[in-house]
Amino acid sequence: MSQLTIILWMLNVIVDTSGQLAFKAAASASAEHDGLAHWKHMLKRPWIWLGVICYVFEFVLWLAFLSLVPLSVGVMLGSINIVVIMIAGRFLFKESLSKWRLIGIMLIACGVTVVGFE
């Protein structure tokens, strides 16, 4: 992979992870409301808008990345986002990482490594 491809991939992972974490923060902060009030409250949270901005930027990065690699490689390399988000969720939101999730993280990381060296 070229240096540009690697940079786009890494930026994509960072921006996608940031968006997911922002959405989680917005959703967690809005848990005390039900129904329509829940959604109105959530839309007032800065976290939701940070998540939307990240996703718009991630969309552009993803298109640029996919223009440089085959779709099958791009999607496989993109799956590292799952690993990064699970680890970030553990540290930022105190979410559990069971033995099976850790095994899954290792398998995904191995798959991404194999495809990355192709």
Image: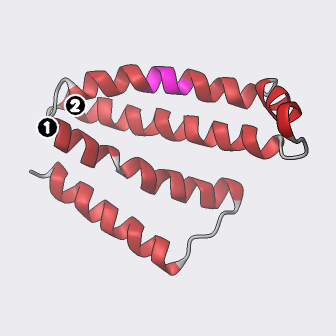
How many residues crowd mark 2 within 10 Å: few (<14), some (14–19), many (20+)?
some
| x then y, percent, for residue 99 | 50, 80
Front-most of residues 32 and 8: 32
| x then y, percent, for residue 9 | 31, 35
- Kind of residue at badge 2: Thr
- Mark 2 vs mark 1, CA separation in Å: 6 Å
Left or right for 73, reference 13: left
At x 30% / y 31%, what residue is drawn?
7
In the rendered view of the protein, which quadrant contains the N terminus? top left
Q: Please state the extent of the stretch shown in magenta in the rendering.
A: 54-58
The dominant secondary structure in magenta is helix
The image's mark for residue 1 is 1
At x 22% / y 57%, what residue is drawn?
113
- The answer to the question of whether label 2 and label 1 lie on touching residues, with beta carbons closer than 8 A, is yes
| x then y, percent, for residue 35 | 84, 38
Residue assigned mark 2: 5
At x 77% / y 46%, what residue is drawn?
28
